[in-house]
Amino acid sequence: MHDALTNKLAQLEQKFAAMGQDMTSYLEGLLQADYLTYWDYIHLETLLSLQNPKTAYPDELIFVTYHQITELYFKLVLHEIAQIAQAAPLTAEFFTARMQRINRYFKLLEASFEVMIMGMEREQFLKFRMALLPSSGFQSVQFREIEIVSTDFRNLLVSAPDDPAYVSDLYEYLYWKLGATELATQQKTLTLRQFDQHYKASLIRLAEAYENQNLNHRLLQVAAAGQASDELASTLREYDWRVNVRWKLAHLRSAVQYLHKEPEDIKATGGTNWQTYLPPVQQQRVFFPSLWSAEELQNWGRSAEPPV
């Protein structure tokens, strides 16, 4: 025990000396520090104070809490993708392991959507949602970031020019802008105008930073180095399917549950055109085109069944 303690102290001394620091001062700080508690570590009181419904309807607490949980999972997804982007060298094993983590996150997110689909009273939702205008889940910047860092920017565009000078020239052609137009006037909704004003510059910077290190680009690099594997391809196909088909079908189910009403559908908050925007067969977004056959791409989004 004494030898083990002496060895640890020697290692600490080397660590602090390498940084020009005095180990004795740090040990004194450790002596004075209080014990760490669970509630302090995760900031429990702060976390539980962040749910602030805008109405008195009980089910609004479910709505806001669910969305906050979703954003935390999105944060984990972006954390894993950043590791893949920065890995040098990047191996197929590391790539696959991190993508498997991400697939687990999206699997949990998809399953949790039952909370939204079945876990609220429709009558309450249709009332409290009016107090949330013009905000919308459309404005989830982390999901947009996930899309941008997952694939080449052009794979997220519609009707883009052939030879743009800068990524910023392509921003207005992002596919999701089509889902945030007023149904009657075809003008940009306030929801979209707010989003662009707040996030446009940062999203353009992100697209520029990931131009040569997004997931699709890193896949092509691994393949060019002869390091690709069937397991990596399968894992990336699952990710593509979960994000661009299953996740969006879950959203569509929720919208139909709460907003479908004969003879005319109810508008989503923010006026987004959910009937044409949410179905994956309409969006046709694919992160890794090289991993899918022509037939699979032609039938993209027509089935919720997993890729073989």
Image (cartoon, rainbow, N blue to C red):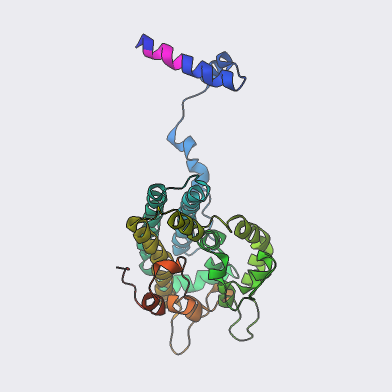
- Above or below: residue 172 compared with residue 202: below
As drawn, is 281 to the left or to the right of 21? Answer: left
User: Can residue 247 be seen in the rendering of this structure?
Assistant: no
| Rendered location of residue 24, percent (x, y) | 56, 13
**Residue located 50% across and 72% down the image:** 127
Judge whether residue 6 is colored magenta: yes
Q: Nearer the viewer, residue 8 or 271?
A: 8
Judge whether residue 296 is colored magenta: no
As drawn, is 236 to the left or to the right of 182? Answer: left
Q: Main secondary structure of the magenta part?
A: helix
Q: Quadrant of residue 135?
A: bottom right
Q: Quadrant of residue 198?
A: bottom right
Q: Nearer the viewer, residue 94 or 177?
A: 94
Q: Nearer the viewer, residue 49 or 282?
A: 282
- Image quadrant where one finds the N terminus: top left
| Rendered location of residue 71, percent (x, y) | 49, 56
User: Residue lying farthest top?
Assistant: 2
> How many marks on residues?
0
- Image quadrant where one finds the C terminus: bottom left
**Residue located 60% across and 23% down the image:** 19
User: Can residue 157 be seen in the rendering of this structure?
Assistant: yes
Q: Quadrant of residue 161?
A: bottom right
| Rendered location of residue 280, percent (x, y) | 44, 75
**Residue located 64% across and 69% down the image:** 171
| Rendered location of residue 139, percent (x, y) | 57, 65
Which contiguous range is marked in magenta?
Answer: 4-9
User: Residue lying farthest left?
Assistant: 308
